[in-house]
Amino acid sequence: MSTRVFLGWLAVGLAGGLSGCDPPLLGDEAASEAVQSVGNALGESDDSDRYARALAPRTFAFPADHGPHPDYRNEWWYFTGNLETSSRRRFGYQLTFFRIALSPEALASESRWRTRQLYMAHFALSDLDAGE
């Protein structure tokens, strides 16, 4: 895969992941109850028992397990690899998408932009030949 194609897919993925993060409208009571503080979103709330927990191994079910599992509070996906230019310069990359649930229940809202999920991403690129 060329670097240009990879960066194009990266841009598409980031745009898609960020598109559903709209704040609740004032007066929308059901959505207002689901708004969480940053601490709650990072797992500091007392509602941990309302989320599914991975306590034992289970059988994977594809293609469903390639996507999100909204019953769980957190999950993440890694994309790692190596790239080489036509002049043989080498790079390594890591792209990680994180999903954090803001509420264990689905939100009752007329807005198609309403979400109970927060998505973030991290991208790192290593220039192997330069050691950077």
Image (cartoon, rainbow, N blue to C red):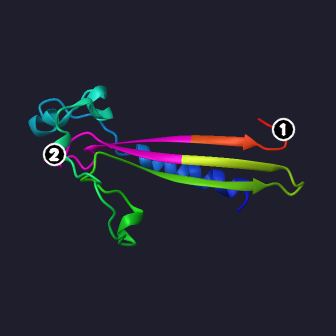
Q: Residue at x 17, y 50 (%)?
A: 106
Q: Which residues are magenta?
A: 96-122
Q: Tag on residue 85?
A: none
Q: Secondary structure at mark 1?
A: loop
Q: Residue at x 28, y 45 (%)?
A: 73
Q: Residues within 10 Å of mark 1 (few under 14, many from 20)?
A: few
**Quadrant holding the C terminus:** top right
**Image-based side of 48 in relation to 95, left or right:** left
Q: Amino acid at mark 1?
A: Ala
Residue closer to the observer: 109 or 99: 99
Q: Amino acid at mark 2?
A: Arg
Residue 43 to residue 101: above or below: above
In the rendered structure, which disc, 1 or 2, sits on the residue that comes first in sequence?
A: 2
Check if residue 128 falls in the magenta segment.
no
**Image-based side of 112 in relation to 5, left or right:** left
Q: Which residue is mark 2?
A: 50
Q: Residue at x 31, y 38 (%)?
A: 22
Residue 1 to residue 39: above or below: below
Of all residues, the one furthest to the right in this rendering is 87
Q: Tag on residue 130?
A: 1
The quadrant holding residue 69 is bottom left
Circles 1 and 2, Cβ within 8 Å, touching? The answer is no
Q: Position of residue 50 (x, y in %)?
A: 16, 45
Of all residues, the one furthest to the front in this rendering is 56
Q: Residues within 10 Å of mark 2 (few under 14, many from 20)?
A: few
Q: Residue at x 11, y 39 (%)?
A: 30
Q: Position of residue 112 (x, y in %)?
A: 25, 50
Q: CA distance from mark 1 to mark 2?
A: 48 Å
Check if residue 121 falls in the magenta segment.
yes
Q: Position of residue 102 (x, y in %)?
A: 26, 39
Residue closer to the observer: 15 or 100: 100
